Image (cartoon, rainbow, N blue to C red):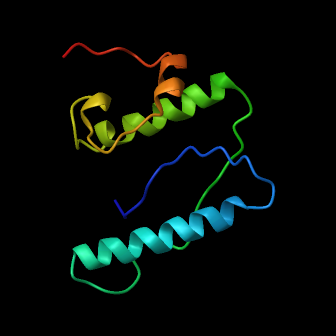
Amino acid sequence: MPNHVHLVIRVERNDISLYRILQSLKRHTAREANKLLSRTGQFWQHESYDRVIRNDRELERIIWCIVQNPVEASLCPRWDQWKWTYIQPDLKSRLQLPRVDP
């Protein structure tokens, strides 16, 4: 699986495009990852895919797909065990994600 990341972002300013946000994020993280890995060159794929989330039900479905991604890739047994998963606390409390026992 190529290097990739899943994000849910709410853009609250009209003067900044999602394209510019992702460009800045990819540039910064690529520089840091390459430094950490002692390498140079392209780190991220050029393309990105975005979609507008229109309601809470769709938001919940998309977040569930995102948190299940490492489980489906056999990187962890449960979505809550992937150390790179972060869901903003007040959003997490609104979602109906399956609860898991420790």
Residue 90, given in percent of the width and then of the height, sits at 52, 24
- The residue under the point 30% across, 78% down is 34
- Which of these two is toward me, 84 or 73? 84
Which residue extends farthest right? 14
* Residue at (68, 59) in percent of width and height: 18
Q: Horizontal and vertical percent for residue 80?
A: 30, 29
**Residue at image coords 32%, 42%:** 70
The N terminus lies in quadrant? bottom left
Residue 45 makes an appearance in the image:
no
Quadrant placement of the C terminus: top left
Q: Position of residue 28 (x, y in %)?
A: 45, 71
The answer to whether residue 47 is left or right of residue 30 is: right
Image side of residue 23 versus residue 35, left or right: right
Image quarter of residue 74: top left
Q: How many marks?
A: 0
Q: Is residue 55 above or below residue 74?
A: above
Image position, residue 73 (x, y; %): 29, 44
Where on the picture, by quarter, is residue 62? Answer: top right
Please determine whether, in this image, residue 91 is positioned above or below residue 75.
above
Return the residue nearer the eye: 1 or 33: 33
- Outermost residue to the bottom: 40
Please state which of residues 15 and 54 is positioned toward the viewer in this rendering: 15
Q: Is residue 50 above or below residue 32?
A: above
- At x 21%, y 31%, the residue is 77
Mark yes or no: residue 72 visible.
yes
Q: Is residue 57 above or below residue 82?
A: above
